Amino acid sequence: MQIYTRTGDKGLTRIIGGSQVAKDSPRVIAYGTVDELNSIVGIIVSMATNYPDLQKELMNIQQLLFDCGNDLANPDKSKEGRLNKDNTLWLESLIDGYSQKAPVVESFILPGGALLASYAHFARTVARRAEREIVTFYWNNDSNEEVLRFVNRLSDYFFALARYINANEGDSDVLYERSGKVFHTEITKADIPEM
């Protein structure tokens, strides 16, 4: 099988359905960054040899990221997207689980700690960029809206995962030194405005 097609030589690429679009179009930028994120997840999978359950979880996320890319690359608005609400709810349950296994967050956290956690933070920042680029694409295009919700939760997932890994590896989160208390862990009466 020949890998190169030469269609990219003029700055164009084919999307699902066969039409050609510019390689710097918002659609291609969005699904290209999702692909970049998927590659980083692959690095984390290969590094997480002491966490076999996490490896399986991340490989499932890789499949779902490919679904995200497929939905973004598909201009056919009549077709239902591959990604669905259940995928986002599953991610939320993972975020809740990892958040409970790490110390309470009270200040801003810098990327760092254990090497595996640092890569999770790296994945978090690329997920945020992917989210911004998907928003740019959505301004002028209809696509599966669940993709944006999923990628938004994915950045939260990698934040929670990084904190869990640091706690599990005995590494402290790297705190922003000039940060005061920025997160409330519970709502008190003082937090509720008077009516």
Image (tube, helix red, strand yellow):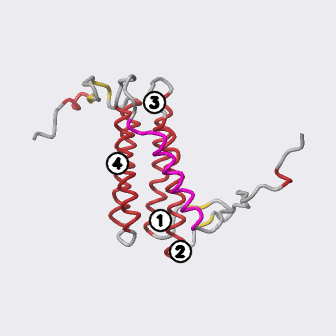
**Mark 1 vs mark 2: which is more N-terminal?**
1
In the image, residue 59 sits, relative to residue 73, either above or below, namely: below
Q: Where is residue 116 in the image (x, y as percent from the top left)?
A: 43, 66
Q: Which residue is drawn at 40% across and 58% down?
A: 57
Instruction: Check if mark 3's residue and mark 2's residue have beta carbons within 8 Å.
Output: no
Instruction: Check if mark 1's residue and mark 2's residue have beta carbons within 8 Å.
Output: yes
Per the image, label 1 sits on a secondary structure element best described as helix
Image quadrant holding the N terminus, namely top left
Q: Distance between the residues labelled 4 and 1?
A: 21 Å
**Mark 3, other Cα within 10 Å: few <14 / some 14–19 / many ≥20:** many
Residue under label 4, please give it: 63
Q: Where is residue 159 in the image (x, y as percent from the top left)?
A: 53, 57
Q: Distance between the residues labelled 3 and 1?
A: 30 Å
Name the mark on residue 117.
1
**Mark 4 vs mark 2: which is more N-terminal?**
4
Amino acid type of disc 3?
A: Phe
Stretch in magenta? 82-101
**Mark 3 vs mark 4: which is more N-terminal?**
4
Residue under label 3, please give it: 137
